[in-house]
Image (cartoon, rainbow, N blue to C red):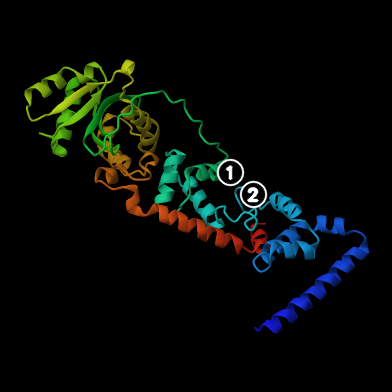
């Protein structure tokens, strides 16, 4: 199309819009008509912005930008979880992303997981949204508000720079389906949050804790390897543990007992104890001691394969092998997802979408 043809088309459209404006003005009810048809006007306005400057559209429609902005904010879309119009709020998640988010939330396989763990899983599977955004949409999908933030106690943060520099050791008591109360003794790697060893027993005697420690040392080749071991000052961490550390010269451990007065604690594995009871146990639900002993390796394997928010969606197994968040190019993928999201939402056919969802 040459310049002459383009100018002719513009003049023709100008004649038509002037005619329509004169007809509307002749009714004496321009204000009422525009208010009654504001949704249609907003949709046309948003479409026209792809081809014309906002100032030109405002002039031809005789409607200010402020009014258009107010009408845009008032528009509701029943197809969107957050009830915002896709055209007027193109930065929101696309319809397909919102449906995918609901699928992860409603999946029975994820019913035992906290929502931040479901977010980490969804992100690794291709849903590139931030955790606050995930909470916002999941609140509308499930009707559950974002969990309240707990008051943080000032402590010295114990953080390793590499796997197997710092280990945590602790025991917790759980109740099986038949009512049996059983102790499970854990050892965790600080850097990766990986559970390195777990032993069930009917008692909290130190011989079971020592057995677990020996197994971990052998399995992960930690003999003659210097590391720190954090544990509580309970009787299960004395006795046989003392004998083992003194008798085997290959064990080069600096044993550190949690001291709350000095603001150092064993809270990383204490948090894991709660997670084991209320997340892992909820999925596997062992019937009795024998069933727990049989399921425990599978439970630990499942836990070490979970995508963790605290590890920026890495699994403990991946972190233990030295993977980094940057290895997956997530930053680039998130930016690309944002650009594609806006483009897709700006091309949504609102009339067809709302008719389909009705």
Q: Residue at x 25, y 42 (%)?
A: 320
**Circle 2: is it few (<14), some (14-19), or many (20+) Cα within 10 Å?**
few
Considering the image in quadrants, where does the C terminus appear? bottom right
Q: Seen in the image, is 247 located left or right of residue 215?
A: left
Q: Nearer the viewer, residue 24 or 182?
A: 24
**For mark 1, what is the residue?**
140
- Secondary structure type for disc 2: loop
Considering the image in quadrants, where does the N terminus appear? bottom right
Q: Nearer the viewer, residue 272 or 1?
A: 1
Residue 139's place in the image compared with 278, above or below, is below
What x and y, as percent, mark residue 69? 71, 52
- Could one spot residue 205 in this view of the protein? no
Q: Mark 1 and 2 residues: CB-CB less than 8 Å, in contact?
A: yes
Q: Residue at x 68, y 67 (%)?
A: 52
* Mark number displayed over residue 83: 2
Of mark 1 and mark 2, the one earlier in the sequence is 2
Residue 210's place in the image compared with 101, above or below, is above
What x and y, as percent, mark residue 3? 67, 82
Q: Seen in the image, is 345 located left or right of residue 214?
A: right
Q: Residue at x 86, y 72 (%)?
A: 19
- Could one spot residue 147 in this view of the protein? yes
**Circle 1: is it few (<14), some (14-19), or many (20+) Cα within 10 Å?**
some
Q: Give the alpha-carbon distance from disc 1 to disc 2, as whole Å.
A: 9 Å
Q: Which quadrant holds residue 152?
A: top left
What x and y, as percent, mark residue 142? 55, 42
What x and y, as percent, mark residue 64? 77, 56
């Amino acid at each position: 199309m040459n310049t002459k043809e383009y100018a002719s088309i513009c003049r023709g459209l100008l004649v038509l819009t002037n005619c329509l404006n004169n007809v509307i003005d002749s009714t004496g009810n321009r204000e009422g008509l525009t208010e009654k048809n504001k949704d249609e006007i907003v949709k046309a306005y948003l479409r026209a912005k792809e081809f014309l400057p906002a100032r030109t559209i405002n002039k031809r429609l005789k409607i200010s930008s402020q009014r258009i902005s107010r009408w845009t904010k008032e528009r509701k879309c029943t197809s969107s979880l957050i009830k915002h119009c896709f055209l007027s709020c193109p930065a929101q998640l696309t319809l397909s992303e919102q449906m995918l988010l609901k699928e992860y939330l409603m999946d029975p396989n994820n019913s035992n997981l906290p929502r931040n763990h479901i977010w980490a899983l969804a992100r690794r599977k291709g849903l590139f949204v931030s955790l606050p955004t995930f909470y916002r949409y999941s609140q509308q999908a499930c009707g559950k508000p974002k969990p309240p933030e707990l008051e943080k106690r000032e402590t010295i943060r114990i953080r390793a720079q590499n796997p197997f520099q710092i280990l945590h050791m602790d025991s917790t008591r759980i109740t099986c389906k038949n009512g049996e109360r059983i102790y499970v003794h854990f050892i965790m790697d600080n850097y990766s949050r990986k559970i390195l060893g777990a032993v069930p027993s009917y008692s909290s005697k130190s011989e079971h804790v020592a057995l677990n420690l020996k197994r971990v040392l052998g399995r992960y080749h930690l003999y003659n390897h210097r590391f720190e071991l954090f544990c509580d000052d309970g009787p299960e961490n004395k006795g046989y543990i003392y004998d083992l550390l003194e008798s085997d010269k290959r064990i080069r451990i600096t044993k550190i007992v949690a001291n709350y007065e000095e603001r150092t604690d064993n809270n990383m594995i204490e948090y894991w104890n709660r997670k084991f009871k209320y997340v892992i146990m909820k999925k596997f639900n062992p019937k009795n001691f024998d069933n727990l002993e049989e399921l425990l390796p599978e439970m630990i394997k499942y836990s070490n394969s979970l995508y963790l928010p605290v590890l920026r969606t890495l699994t403990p197994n991946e972190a233990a092998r030295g993977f980094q968040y940057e290895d997956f190019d997530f930053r680039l993928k998130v930016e690309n997802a944002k650009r594609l999201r806006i483009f897709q939402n700006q091309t949504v056919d609102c009339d067809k979408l709302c008719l389909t969802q009705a």
